[in-house]
Image: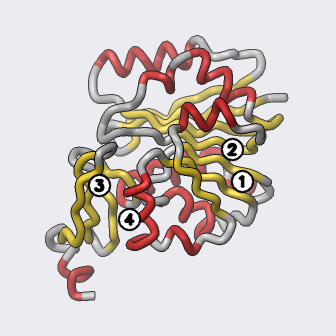
Amino acid sequence: MIKKIFSYLIPIKIYETKSSLSKSIEVTWANGELVLDSENANYSYGSLQRILRLGLKNIGFEKIVPMKHILVLGVAGGSVIKTLVDEIKYKGKITGVEIDPEIIKIANTYFKLDEVKNLEIVIDDAFEFVLKTKAKYDLIIIDVFQDTTMPNFLFETFFINRICFLLKSHGFILFNTMLLNESQNLRNKKYVSEFFKSEFQIKTIPRVEIHNELIVIEKMN
């Protein structure tokens, strides 16, 4: 409790580890809440939770509550899952895919992710999981980073087509992206401009927490 109080004055690191996949991982008290950070980015809670909460709010909490199955690609500490369960009161199934088992251990220890009853965690690469899964989803949340880097496959046509195939009619995709330079800005513009306009409605929420851009996609039929 003392660390929590002092964290309003200065961040207090309580755990640090090295992961072969995510490199440096830290759990820190900051402004009265526990956050999970990589070397250069917030992985869960803190700014990331605010970013994804805004995306979910844009979709509409009232639309999310009756959904049957949500897929989260990139779990980290599970802040978006906590938003779904604790704030939106979502009670349907959540499948969370995370490539780094070390991060899930941290999420269970410090953020009690293993206490979420309607959550199934799958340790797998997001691309591999998307290829293998036979389920269809009402909402797919894509939040895949290694520090500040986004894998190229997220923007490739094959992956986009597969994600769209896995989406139920009138389902949503919430895609969190990071824009640190002009090439990444152009990458996002290309992604949005080339999307299948007849079947999907797509919009962006730019400059969320300075460097993030949310892409919200709705399947229209």
| Secondary element at image label 1 | helix
In the picture, residue 22 is in which quadrant? top left
Residue underneath mark 4 = 106
Q: In 3D space, how far apart are the residues under numbered discs 4 and 3 (Cα atoms)?
A: 11 Å
Mark 4: few, some, or many residues within 10 Å (few <14, many ≥20)? many
Q: Are marks 2 and 1 in contact (CB under 8 Å)?
A: yes
Nearer the viewer's eye, disc 2 or disc 4?
4
Residue underneath mark 2 = 139
Residue underneath mark 1 = 64
| Mark toward the start of the polypeptide (4 vs 1) | 1
| Mark toward the start of the polypeptide (2 vs 3) | 3
| Secondary element at image label 2 | strand
Number of marks present in the image shown: 4
| Mark toward the start of the polypeptide (3 vs 1) | 3
Give percent across and percent down for residue 84. Answer: 61, 61
Residue furthest out toward the left: 10
Q: Are marks 4 and 3 in contact (CB under 8 Å)?
A: no
Look at label 4 and name its amino acid.
Answer: Ile
Q: Which mark is residue 162?
A: none
